[in-house]
Image (cartoon, grey):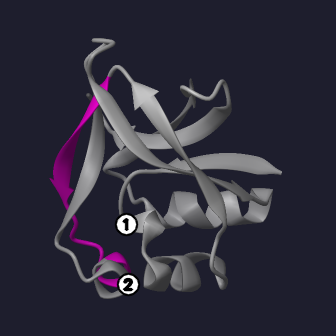
């Protein structure tokens, strides 16, 4: 099983149903050294699922006082591939360590 941190639209029920065909269960956690910016989404399927033109996007600052809260979900490898498709080319997926000590995948703004 994989761990995936969501701080944005992957927490929305409709996005989870469209992306994973189920509602996810997770636990709250915090990521240090990042802030949340935004990216404009142009992918029609993503726009339809989220209902939002602008999506949150992590930006690394390296400052321990900068934190982002969200949810760590446990998903399958196939579901991680589905998340990769949902998160379009404006994001990259990296692995980070969270306040709980858990390591999880997270999507951040490409080039930030």
> Are the residues tagged 1 and 2 within 8 Å (C-beta)?
yes
In the displayed structure, 62 sits above or below 110; it is above
Q: Is residue 44 magenta?
A: yes
Q: Earlier in the sequence, mark 1 or mark 2?
A: 1
Rounded to the nearest whole Å, what is the CA distance between mark 1 and mark 2? Answer: 9 Å
**Which residue is label 2 attached to?**
49
Q: Quadrant of residue 42?
A: bottom left
Q: Residue at x 54, y 77 (%)?
A: 16
The magenta segment is 34-46
In the displayed structure, 56 sits above or below 45; it is above
Q: Which mark is residue 9?
A: 1
- Is 97 situated left or right of 49 in this image? right
- Is 88 situated left or right of 22 in this image? left
Residue at disc 2, secondary structure: helix
Label 2 Cα neighbours within 10 Å, binned few <14 / some 14-19 / many ≥20: some
Nearer to the camera, 3 or 46: 3
Q: Which mark is residue 109?
A: none
Q: Quadrant of the C terminus?
A: top left
- Could you tell me residue 88's position as x and y percent? 39, 60
Residue at disc 1, secondary structure: helix
- Is 10 situated left or right of 3 in this image? left
Q: Is residue 73 magenta?
A: no
Label 1 Cα neighbours within 10 Å, binned few <14 / some 14-19 / many ≥20: some
- Is 94 situated left or right of 50 in this image? right
In the displayed structure, 47 sits above or below 74; it is below
């Amino acid at each position: 099983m994989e761990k995936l941190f969501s701080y944005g639209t992957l927490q929305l029920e409709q996005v989870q149903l469209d992306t994973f065909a189920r509602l996810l269960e997770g636990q709250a956690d915090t990521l240090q050294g990042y802030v949340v910016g935004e990216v404009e989404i142009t992918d029609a399927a993503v726009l339809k699922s989220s209902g939002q033109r602008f999506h949150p996007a992590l930006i690394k600052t390296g400052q321990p006082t900068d934190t982002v809260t969200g949810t760590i979900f446990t998903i399958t490898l196939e579901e991680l591939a589905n998340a990769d498709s949902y998160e379009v080319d404006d994001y990259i997926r990296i692995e980070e360590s969270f306040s709980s000590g858990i390591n999880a995948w997270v999507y951040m703004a490409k080039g930030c």
